[in-house]
Amino acid sequence: MRSVTFADARVVDLLNAKFVVAWNNHNPDLDGGAGARQPRFTAEELELYPEGGGGGNVRAIVCLPDGRIVHYVMGWFRPERLVEELEFALTLDEKDAREKHDAHAREHAEAQATLAKDHPREMTRDFAQSAIRRRHAMLGLQAQTHAVAAGVLLQAVDKHLDEVKRHSSSRAFK
């Protein structure tokens, strides 16, 4: 995500214009340890990687000015999709955020179900062989992202990151 999505000019410009950015690597061992280089992927490999993948370690958390979470994007997304999520986050306030997250979660889940219904054979194919299957996975991961965001809504980010770190440290990554 660092070398692709967060390096994209559209993402950088939006983040610089509208957000205060902080970085937290809650589990450095997962990406090779301190100082390790992020793996480089070819354009072809990235095209086959389902958006939203890597949600166990990759998160973009958007907070209100007082540090309470208003949006929580899990997993790797292409720059255009992250820009959509960040623009969505700009529409949120503490009065309507849960309602908007719930609506987005439902919309993505419904679109995922429709895609599966309209393309049953594609659902049996490998991700590398099917753009429809990759879109199906991405819609499910977006639905999950909005459901998780609704679940951590208005929690203090520092307390939440402490919990994420405790949870990550207690799991054995191999």
Image (cartoon, grey):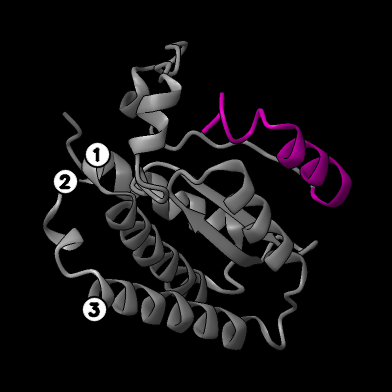
> Which residue is outermost to the right?
17
Q: Secondary structure at mark 2?
A: loop
Tell me where residue 142 sits by quadrant. Answer: bottom left
Residue 126 is marked as 2
Q: Secondary structure at mark 3?
A: helix
Rendered-image quadrant of the C terminus: top left
Q: Secondary structure at mark 1?
A: helix
Say if 16 sits above or below 93 in the image.
above
Residue at coordinates 24% horizontally, 39% vertically from top-left? Answer: 128
Q: Earlier in the sequence, mark 1 or mark 3?
A: 3
Q: Position of residue 55 (x, y in %)?
A: 37, 49
Q: Amino acid at mark 2?
A: Asp
Label 3: how many residues lie within 10 Å, few (<14), some (14-19) or many (20+)? few
Q: Is residue 28 visible?
A: no
Tell me where residue 170 sits by quadrant. Answer: top left
Q: Earlier in the sequence, mark 2 or mark 3?
A: 3
The answer to whether marks 2 and 3 mark residues whose Cβ atoms lie closer than 8 Å is no
Q: Position of residue 92 (x, y in %)?
A: 72, 75
Q: Amino acid at mark 3?
A: Lys
The answer to whether marks 1 and 2 mark residues whose Cβ atoms lie closer than 8 Å is yes
Q: Which residue is mark 1?
A: 128
Spatial CA span between label 1 and label 2: 5 Å
Q: Which residues are magenta?
A: 1-19
Q: Which residue is mark 3?
A: 117
Say if 76 sits above or below 66 in the image.
above
Is residue 64 left or right of 106 when viewed as pictured? right
Q: Nearer the viewer, residue 79 or 30?
A: 79
Label 2: how many residues lie within 10 Å, few (<14), some (14-19) or many (20+)? few
